Amino acid sequence: MHANTLLRPLTLRRAEPDDLAGVLTLLSDTAEWLYSRGVRQWPRDGFGPERIEPLIEERVLYLLEDELRYFSPGEPAPPVATIALDRHADAEFWTLDDAPHAALYVHKLAVGRSWSGVGLGDALLDWAGRTAYDAGLPWLRLDCAKGNPRLQGYYRSRGFRHLRTVDLPHRASGALFQRPARDVAITEFRDLTFAELISA
């Protein structure tokens, strides 16, 4: 049984420059965990800051954090999870026939190992789908490792449809998935990005 449960208060917010180190740690830990299971989608040491800083600057990287961490200010507290959500359709994967501007795209979805198995990945995907819906877009899309049937099965079980696999020799990713954007209630965390939209 996990020590962390969804009874702990969680908050989703946009990443800020000061969050870079925590995000890099989370992605590095996730990449190492993937490698231990034979999955080579991400660089083994995680991503360098040059790959993550632009996402923070563009305001498309989001963090899920444990609000109780503020009671232990001296302890390092990487985010519970992270997700990037944007309109950037990878041109090597998504063609004009896909109507690439008709979707939001998920990148860098990662959940800390101590929080795995409690449904946070599902909740973040639901949030991303609702965000696409609120933007008037019909689809939520992502690409994942073409050699990872377990991950592909996970996305299928969450309502994503496999469109095709693009097999590029220089890319581990290439399995393309989408599901309809829909309005869903998110109860697993407090969404501070919603307040941002209202005040904008």
Image (tube, rainbow, N blue to C red):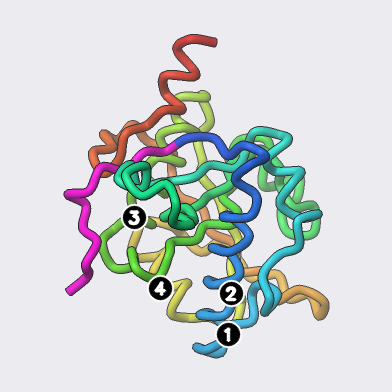
Mark 3: which secondary structure?
A: helix
Q: Which residue is denoted by mark 2 in the rendering?
A: 31
Q: Residue 126 location in percent, x, y?
A: 37, 44
Q: Which residue is denoted by mark 4 in the rendering?
A: 153
Q: Residue 113 location in percent, x, y?
A: 40, 70
Residue 81: image quadrant is bottom left
- Of the residues under marks 3 and 4, which one precedes in the sequence? 3
- Of the residues under marks 3 and 1, which one precedes in the sequence? 1
**Residue 7 counted in the magenta span:** yes
**Residue 27 counted in the magenta span:** no
Label 3: few (<14), some (14–19) or many (≥20) C-alpha neighbours in 10 Å: many
The amino acid type of the residue labelled 2 equals Ala
- Residue at image x 57%, y 55%? 22
Which mark is drawn over residue 35?
1
The span picked out in magenta is 1-12
Q: Are marks 1 and 2 in contact (CB under 8 Å)?
A: yes
Majority secondary structure in the magenta region: loop
Tell us which disc is closer to us: 2 or 4: 2
Please identify the residue farthest to the top as the structure is shown. 199
- Residue at image x 46%, y 73%? 151
Label 1: few (<14), some (14–19) or many (≥20) C-alpha neighbours in 10 Å: some
The amino acid type of the residue labelled 1 equals Tyr
